[in-house]
Image (tube, grey):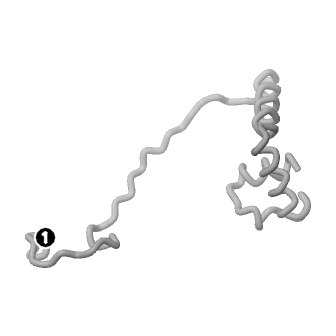
Amino acid sequence: MVEGIIYRYRCGIAWRDLPDVFGPWPTVWTWHRRMAADGTWDRILANLTAAADAAGLVDWSLSVDSTIARAHQHATNITRHTGGWIELQ
């Protein structure tokens, strides 16, 4: 179950796209939901991270993407007001 949950987060896939090797996706999802609700998942993740860090397997470098996507003013779904100076251009 833990490997299925980690695989799902690592790949960024939907639960329904989880490969069959991990078992039925509803079962994996239910286990994750229960473990997340009672704090078990946080403890598992902390222990796995600490063990990997102690073995030197964790690279703590960070990359931040500052990409900005801008939409044209007419691409919004707000009500369009006519007669303004923008309409005249």
x then y, percent, for residue 78: 30, 71
Of 5 and 35, nearer the camera is 35
The image shows residue 43, relative to residue 24, as above or below, that is above
The reply, left or right, for residue 77 in relation to residue 35 is left
Quarter occupied by the C terminus: bottom left
Near mark 1 (Cα within 10 A), the count class, few <14, some 14-19 or many ≥20, is few
Rendered location of residue 56, percent (x, y):
77, 24
> x, y percentage for residue 41?
79, 40
Query: Which residue in the rendered view is the most extreme toward the front?
Result: 38
Residue shown at 77%/66% (left/top)?
17
Residue at image location 68% in from the left, 30% down from the top: 59
Label 1 SS: loop
Q: Position of residue 30 (x, y in %)?
A: 83, 56
| Left or right: residue 68 compared with residue 58 | left
Q: Residue at x 43, y 45 (%)?
A: 66
* Amino acid at pointer 1: Ile
Q: Is residue 71 above or below residue 58?
A: below
* Residue holding disc 1: 86
Q: Hey, which residue is sitting farthest bottom in the picture?
A: 82
Counting the numbered discs, the total is 1
Instruction: Report which quarter residue 16 is drawn in.
Output: bottom right
Classify residue 13 by image quadrant: bottom right
